[in-house]
Image (tube, rainbow, N blue to C red):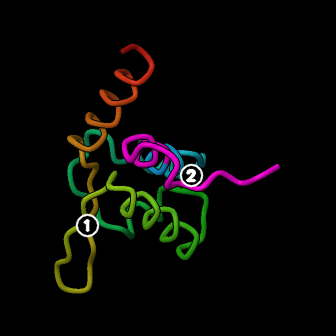
Amino acid sequence: MPVAKLEAFEKSAVSMAAFAKALAHPARICILRYLAGKGEVACMDIVAALPLSQPACSRHINELRKAGLLKSRERGSHVFFQIDESALSRFCQAMNQTLHP
């Protein structure tokens, strides 16, 4: 079975798939759930809240950040994260438009 090339699809569909892929792991859902309504949270606090090693947690946080779901800010040696609510809202609206044109 041939593998579909991303160039064959609309840019919006590729973008939504990348965003959805970032959500496709339970650890990432737990990170988002932990951050929901908290504003900025230090990375070390996220690590302490999850049953994962620090490197594993950092990898999942990085995937969420690369997908645009998280905003980050550095202060000294600390990194703070928060959900990018506007990106999440745009994804939900785009998915709704795609499924219910």
Q: Is residue 61 left or right of residue 91?
A: right
Dot 2 or dot 1: first in sequence order is: 2
The residue where tag 1 is placed is 80
Q: Is residue 94 left or right of residue 23?
A: left
| Tag of residue 27 | 2
Give the residue drawn at x 34%, y 22%. 97
Instruction: Between residue 36 and residue 12, name the one nearer to us.
Output: 12
- Residue 40 position, x and y percent, is 22, 56
Q: Secondary structure at mark 1?
A: strand
- Residue 84 position, x and y percent, is 24, 48
- Marks 2 and 1 sit apart, C-alpha to C-alpha, by 18 Å
Quarter of the view holding residue 75:
bottom left
Instruction: Between residue 20 and residue 101, name the one nearer to us.
Output: 101
The quarter of the picture where the C terminus appears is top left
Give the residue drawn at x 48%, y 71%. 58
Region of the chain picked out in magenta, as a range: 1-17
- Residue 4 position, x and y percent, is 65, 51
Label 2 is placed on what type of residue?
A: Ala
Instruction: Between residue 6 and residue 46, name the one nearer to us.
Output: 6
Give the residue drawn at x 40%, y 28%. 95
